[in-house]
Amino acid sequence: MNREATAIRLAERLSHLTAAGKLTWIDAGRLGPWGTWPGQVFKASVEGGTFAQIAEVPVLNSLITSYYFGVAEGKPQVFEVNVQDRSSEFFEVFAEGYPSEPTNEKLKLLRSLKDLYLAARENAKGTRQKVEKFEQLLERLA
């Protein structure tokens, strides 16, 4: 199994489901620290007790941001984000913000995970609904 290709496929499917409103993400708090900074994590529950999580991991004193993506099984209250103990995870991949050997696949993985992270963040914060509500307010004022 090619981990990067699998992660790209999963991230793209999750992004499409999120955009279609068929998947809901929650803010899972901070992960880490990895290195010296924590990363922001979002997770979503999929049928059958499976969970996906996506994390943005900033690199200290840099504009570079990496992404972590994982899939696990378990109950929501048991599935906690913990760097040292990820025993319930059966798939995980890390996309370097600036790959040391930037192959096309590594760059596509980085873009796919970044897109998934942005979709998950928007979904968890209800950004689309807030913008629509704001637009309606502006229309009433006009």
Image (cartoon, rainbow, N blue to C red):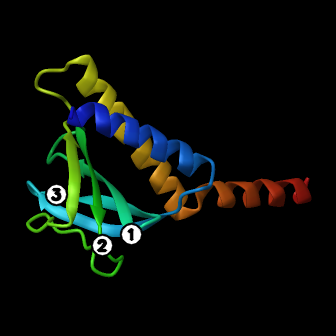
Q: Nearer the viewer, mark 2 or mark 3?
A: 2
Q: Residue 29: horizontal and vertical position, in percent?
A: 32, 69
**Amino acid under label 3?**
Trp
- The image quarter containing residue 50 is bottom left
Residue named by callout 1: 49
Other residues around mark 1 within 10 Å, as few (<14) / some (14–19) / many (≥20) = few
Front-lying residue, 2 or 59: 2
Instruction: In the rendered view, tell whether residue 102 sits above or below residue 138.
Output: above
Q: Nearer the viewer, mark 3 or mark 1?
A: 1
Q: Are marks 1 and 2 in contact (CB under 8 Å)?
A: yes
**Amino acid under label 2?**
Gly
Would you say residue 10 is visible in this rendering? yes
Other residues around mark 2 within 10 Å, as few (<14) / some (14–19) / many (≥20) = some
Front-lying residue, 25 or 49: 49
Q: Residue at x 17, y 68 (%)?
A: 82
Q: Residue 74: horizontal and vertical position, in percent?
A: 30, 72
Q: Earlier in the sequence, mark 1 or mark 2?
A: 1
Residue named by callout 2: 74
Q: Residue 91: horizontal and vertical position, in percent?
A: 23, 51
Residue named by callout 3: 37
- Judge left or right: residue 69 versus residue 36: right
The kind of secondary structure element at disc 2 is loop
**Amino acid under label 1?**
Gly
Number of numbered labels in the structure image: 3
The kind of secondary structure element at disc 3 is strand
C-alpha separation, residue under disc 2 versus residue under disc 3: 27 Å
Other residues around mark 3 within 10 Å, as few (<14) / some (14–19) / many (≥20) = some
Q: Are marks 2 and 3 in contact (CB under 8 Å)?
A: no
Instruction: In the rendered view, tell whether residue 3 sits above or below residue 84.
Output: above
